[in-house]
Image (spheres, rainbow, N blue to C red):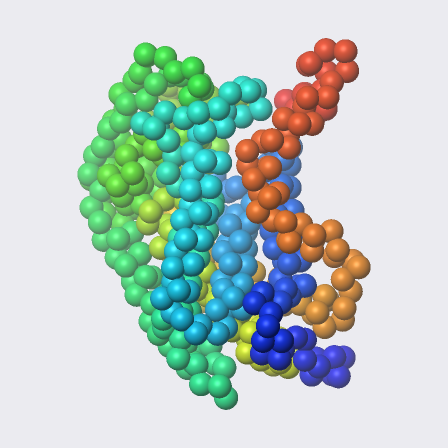
Amino acid sequence: MADLLHKPLLDIEEQPRTSKKTPRVASLDVFRGLCVFLMMLVDYGGAIVPIIAHSPWNGLHLADFVMPFFLFTAGVSLALVYKRVPNRIEATRKAVLRAVELFLLGVILQGGYFHGINFLTYGVDMKRIRWLGILQRISIGYIFAALCEIWLSCRSRRDVSFLKSYYWHWGAAFSLSAIYWGLLYGLYVPDWQFEMSNATSSVFPTNHSYVYMVKCSVRGDLGPACNSAGMIDRYVLGIDHLYKKPVYRNLKECNMSTNGQVPESAPSWCHAPFDPEGVLSSITAAVACIIGLQYGHSLAHLQDHKQRMQNWILFSLSLLLVGLLLAVVGDPVNKSLYTFGYMLITCASAGITYSAIYLLVDVYGYRCLTFALEWMGKHSLSIFVLITSNLAVIAIQGFYWKAPENNLIQWIVTRFVRR
């Protein structure tokens, strides 16, 4: 054990200078594959086992770890990609281009362009397109962390310390956190109203609509109705461009039916759109990516397994302790708002999980046990596109027995989801 922990994994600095590609780290691919697997598990299994689906508001379920894990992976990868930056301008250009590509792909996948498995149609009304989503959030965290790594790194070659070597990174993270906290607790949220169509599908809208009034007139409220994150999104993005089926509709107050309909007797805010990947919560998501970047520094610049593990475990436990302390003093663990406590707890969980995978895969070399996850990690974006666009489900649904209704997807829905 001791010999393994002191054995170098892969010295990227010793790779041939003719190689332009950053060497892949098996544990990072496995961790990324785990993120993809968890995403599929909670997306398709959440309807069958609700406890693994997203928490309706405050709380932490299995699905609430997926986004932070993706952001963590993006941050770690950036430390490897930008270990050396000979030309900051060119590196910045490539980082911005990559972020824009991810953002636009996210808009296509989650903006309403695809209409789901029940409609073999496509296209989206630009007046109702959803601008933010999963890939868009990752792209925002990616560009913040990339700019930090390209422009704000001043590490001495003999010292790789989370705090001392990258103090400008931490300055950026603390600044973003201060902005987030100031806006979340400091903005005044007035009463607001919205108009919603009674159409159940964006593909075939109707002309019938209702006007709802939400009473707020508060400051610092963290409930679904009157938080400043939702107000910022309504002003900046417009209410028609927000997510139409927010997870808080699963709260008891909304009394949502099994077919996803909210009764008129429910509070007015239950009918309102809300984007869990909104503008304000993207700030702390960017901080999460910067934290992942700090883990990546140990992977990129330290060659001793034991020293890497010590850094990661100590850092993870520190984040977990602060996150739990914030939860105790009243900062809720909330994925939709991406609260500071939620961010710290999930970053710590990502760090501990990655440390365990690193020990299993890169230290002990048990890659045969995780080869499926490693493959998924290497093709994570392609799998994400197939899953999010429902192309994989549509392809399976196309094979039926005697009648189109007798397909595997319909059988699963009837057998497990609607029972």
Relative placement, left or right, of 400 versus 181 is: right
Labels in figure, total: 0
**Residue at point 48%, 32% (across, down):** 250
Examine the rendering and report whether any part of residue 362 can be seen.
yes
Classify residue 305 by image quadrant. Answer: bottom right
**Residue 93's x, y, as percent?**
38, 59
In the foreground, 381 or 208: 381
Q: Residue furthest bottom?
A: 158
**Residue at point 52%, 41% (across, down):** 54
In the foreground, 256 or 146: 146
Q: Residue furthest right?
A: 368
Q: Quadrant of the C terminus?
A: top right
Q: Quadrant of the N terminus?
A: bottom right
**Residue at point 27%, 27% (across, down):** 194
In the foreground, 80 or 27: 80
**Residue 20's x, y, as percent?**
56, 67
Relative placement, left or right, of 82 versus 414 is: left
Examine the rendering and report whether any part of residue 12 can be seen.
no
Q: Residue furthest front?
A: 18
Q: Is residue 411 above or below residue 336?
A: above
Q: Is residue 406 above or below residue 53?
A: above
**Residue 4's x, y, as percent?**
74, 79
Classify residue 173 by image quadrant. Answer: bottom left
**Residue at point 55%, 78% (across, down):** 301
**Residue 128's x, y, as percent?**
35, 28
